[in-house]
Amino acid sequence: MSRPVALACVLICALIWGTTWYAITLQLGTVDPVASVTYRFGLAAAVIFAGCLITGRSVKMTRGQHLALMGQGLFVFTIGYAFVYWAEERVASAVVAVIFAALAFLNLVLFRVVARQKAAPLAWAGAGLGILGVGVLFASELLRAGMDQRAMIGLTFALIAVSASAVGNVFAWKVQTAAAPVIPATAWAMAYGTAFLALFGLAIGVEWAFEFTPRYMLSLLHLSMLGSVVAFLLYFTLARARGYALASYISALTPPVAMLVSVMFEGASFGIAAFAGLALVLAGQMLLIKAPRVSAA
């Protein structure tokens, strides 16, 4: 994948995911978050499987591929997104989006430990700026909330979500090394994530309600079709071609979009510290994109 194509994928995903953070808030209220996440990825998986069937793509996987896909589904789509929805019940959607910029740093660390992949010093510097920016935003939002317990729980849930997503990316890399095609692999990962969510929901007694309102159904379609089918297929394709460090930094480009949407539709307001954190995140993103790719140990 050429650099212009890679950057186009980054931009498209950032624009889509920059709006999905707010779209998630439209799912909160009547329907339990676990049920909403289950509907979202269940629908997305069904659409991708249907696309494979229509285009004649094989969805058969080996036992090893299925095991890696189960790990990817569990950490990315079950744990990661359940905690995202729970976090957004407590803090502004844009705050969760900015915290997800830590994904780049966590990926660099995990892939260095698990896959023994090297990263250029410039990439470490960029990820370091990103994590510093997240820390500044985390502290500023906590202080603005007066150290409120609800805000603390929401911010902690966001950190758990991004950590789970980083672990999920390691499993996605294992899926790649097992030579599983990206489109059917993504369908299986979402299907496993949906299954784990459904089992978890049954275990804790979730009420499987559905809200038949334009607000809920349109947000569900946006989250499933654009936020899940289109964006995740682009994301995992980009990750395979250019590496997970660059791909994960999509989450560093989404905060400006997410913050603008949050201000416009949630009535959120951000202080100087929050914008300082955002500036650090964006500066880190520029360094990471410019960093040479180094993958050998």
Image (tube, rainbow, N blue to C red):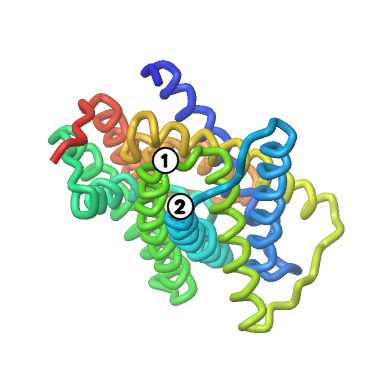
Q: Residue at x 62, y 61 (%)?
A: 194
Tell me the element at label 2: helix
Looking at the image, residue 195 lies above or below residue 113 = below
Left or right placement of residue 144 versus residue 87 in this view: left
**Residue underneath mark 1:** 179
Q: Quadrant of residue 264?
A: top right
Q: Position of residue 110 (x, y in %)?
A: 25, 53
**Residue underneath mark 2:** 65
Along the viewing direction, whichever of 74 and 27 lies nearer the viewer = 74
Q: Position of residue 111 (x, y in %)?
A: 25, 48
Tell me the element at label 1: loop
Q: Residue at x 49, y 65 (%)?
A: 79
Looking at the image, residue 158 lies above or below residue 229 = below
Q: Residue at x 52, y 33 (%)?
A: 234
Q: Position of residue 144 (x, y in %)?
A: 41, 62
Left or right placement of residue 218 versus residue 8 in this view: right
Asked if residue 96 can be seen in this view, the reply is: no
Left or right placement of residue 5 versus residue 27 in this view: left
- Split into 4 quadrants, where in the image is the C terminus? top left
Number of the label disc, if any, that sits on residue 221: none
Asked if residue 79 can be seen in this view, the reply is: yes
Q: Earlier in the sequence, mark 2 or mark 1?
A: 2
Q: Position of residue 44 (x, y in %)?
A: 67, 48
Label 2, label 1: how far apart the Cα atoms are: 8 Å
Q: Kindly identify the amino acid type of the residue bearing the numbered disc 1.
A: Ala
Along the viewing direction, whichever of 150 and 244 lies nearer the viewer = 244
Along the viewing direction, whichever of 195 and 207 lies nearer the viewer = 195
Looking at the image, residue 80 lies above or below residue 253 = below
